[in-house]
Image: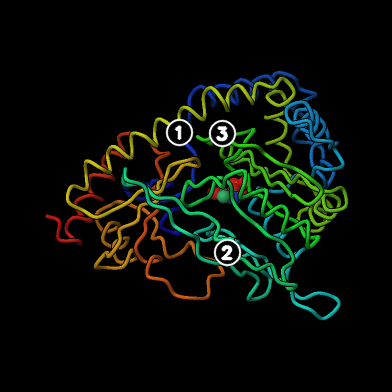
């Protein structure tokens, strides 16, 4: 994390293909600038923004507008009582995982099931106690075009009585995988049968920021907790996460907010309020953000293929999020060693081995993958991929 922070703060001239920072998309940013200017032009609005605590659940106007938008868009029967904001969705995971897993009052110990790894690195350390996660390997499907795709291996999936919740990121960080509707339906059925929640991490998902390149449904029910965020829309600095859940769960999140931070920052929901109440957030997500990242995903795959002649590699199907996941079967050095070599040459990517939280068994595949972010400016991605290609060719003896 220090490497990523240094690179973003400009401490070194680094090709930053490692972090999860979203791109600065001018057409999206102009909305934020415009909204801020309008807030500053209205002294009452500005004074409310900086001078008042919001309720622990979060900015009420934003929550009401969001509930209305989701009702209209998806027909979900939800209201403001189903929504609580958090200080970024990372914080929501800390709250949710420790709510549904860990030591229980009846003396039992519950865990979070990640039905498929690779999975988001940010979950790994949020448990207040050790051993909060259990996970399993995916099934791997390969395609003739040099891509591959992970699937939940339902044949091996067991939801034991010690499981307190199931969680998936969709789209998945780090792989760009998007679980199919069928996979989500099956996970939902398993959660319902055990009366536990299925937590869907929708940080990149629909309806916003909609960095999803496949056609999917977004489900919600009383057994689903949907976690959303303003970050990947282009607002990571305002730290706004959104939990959509059963009213008692949303109320518990609000209660935890009150304890952790008294009140949440008002800036994110205030900036996003007009975008949500006008529906403009959907237009921006569908017509600007999604095509922007889809183009970058395509372009970065072309760069990688050009940079890796003679190398045995596969790219995970780029179905969403802001990353490519590259698998180098039989890589003679570990992905961590490759990460070190690349860092020395001024390119930051992430070694794949970090992304297997809760997976007890060792698996060679863990050490054969890299996560590459394509969100940064084209010139930086191009420079980084060129050096990446040189180092991989050197490591694999491909010239
Ligand atoms: C899958 C996923 N979930 C959650 C988060 C946390 O985002 P934030 O705390 O900025 O909302 C990230 C950040 O990269 C992510 O990739």
Q: Earlier in the sequence, mark 2 or mark 3?
A: 2
Q: Which residue is mark 3?
A: 215
In-front residue for pair 167/341: 167
Please name the residue shown 87% across and 42% down the image: 81
User: Quarter holding the C terminus?
Assistant: bottom left
Percent position of residue 26, x then y:
48, 24
Percent position of residue 136, x then y:
54, 67
Residue 165 versus residue 211 in the image, above or below = below
- When asked about the image quadrant of residue 215, the answer is top right
CA gap, disc 2 and disc 3:
25 Å
Q: Residue 366: which numbered mark, if any?
A: none
Residue 127 lies left or right of residue 2; in this view the side is right
Query: Do callouts 2 and 1 mark residues in contact (Cβ within 8 Å)?
Result: no
Q: Residue furthest front?
A: 155
- When asked about the image quadrant of residue 273, the answer is top right
CA gap, disc 3 and disc 1:
16 Å
Task: State whether label 3 is within 8 Å of ligand 1.
Answer: no
Q: Which residue is mark 2?
A: 155
Q: Residue 293: which numbered mark, if any?
A: 1
Please name the residue shown 76% across and 54% down the image: 261
* Label 3 SS: loop
Task: State whether label 2 is within 8 Å of ligand 1.
Answer: no
Mark in front: 2 vs 1: 2
Residue 310 lies left or right of residue 76; in this view the side is left
In-front residue for pair 150/52: 150
Percent position of residue 275, x then y:
68, 24
Mark in front: 3 vs 1: 3
């Amino acid at each position: 994390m220090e490497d990523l922070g240094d690179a973003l703060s400009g401490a070194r001239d680094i090709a930053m293909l490692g972090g999860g920072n979203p791109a600065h998309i001018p057409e999206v940013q102009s909305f934020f600038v415009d909204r801020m200017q309008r807030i500053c032009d209205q002294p009452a609005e500005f004074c409310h923004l900086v001078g008042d605590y919001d309720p622990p659940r979060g900015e009420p106007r934003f929550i009401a507008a969001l509930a209305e938008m989701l009702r209209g868009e998806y027909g979900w029967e939800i209201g403001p009582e189903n929504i609580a904001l958090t200080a970024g969705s990372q914080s929501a995971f800390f709250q949710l995982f420790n709510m549904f897993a860990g030591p229980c009052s009846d003396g039992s110990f519950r865990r979070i099931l990640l039905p498929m790894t690779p999975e988001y690195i940010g979950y790994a350390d949020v448990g207040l106690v050790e051993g909060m996660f259990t996970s399993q390997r995916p099934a791997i499907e390969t395609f003739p075009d040099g891509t591959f795709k992970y699937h939940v291996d339902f044949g091996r999936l067991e939801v034991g009585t010690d499981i307190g919740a199931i969680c998936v990121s969709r789209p998945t960080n780090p792989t760009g995988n998007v679980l199919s509707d069928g996979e989500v339906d099956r996970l939902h059925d398993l959660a319902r049968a055990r009366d536990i929640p299925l937590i869907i991490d929708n940080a990149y998902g629909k309806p916003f920021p909609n960095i999803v390149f496949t056609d999917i449904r977004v489900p919600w029910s009383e057994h689903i907790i949907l976690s959303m965020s303003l970050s990947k829309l282009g607002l990571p600095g305002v730290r706004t996460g959104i939990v959509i859940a059963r009213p008692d769960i949303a109320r518990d999140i609000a209660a935890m907010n009150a304890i952790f931070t008294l009140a949440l920052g008002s800036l994110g929901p205030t900036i996003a309020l007009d975008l949500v109440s006008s529906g403009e957030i959907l237009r921006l997500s569908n017509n600007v953000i999604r095509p922007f990242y889809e183009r970058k995903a395509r372009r970065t795959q072309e760069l990688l293929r050009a940079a890796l002649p003679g190398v045995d590699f596969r790219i995970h199907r780029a179905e969403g999020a802001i990353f490519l996941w590259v698998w180098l079967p039989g890589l003679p050095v570990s992905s961590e060693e490759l990460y070190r070599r690349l860092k020395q040459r001024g390119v930051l990517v992430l070694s794949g081995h970090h992304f297997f939280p809760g997976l007890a068994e060792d698996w060679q595949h863990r050490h054969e993958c890299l996560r590459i972010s394509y969100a940064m400016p084209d010139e930086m991605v191009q420079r980084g991929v060129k050096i990446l290609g040189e180092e991989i060719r050197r490591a694999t003896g491909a010239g």
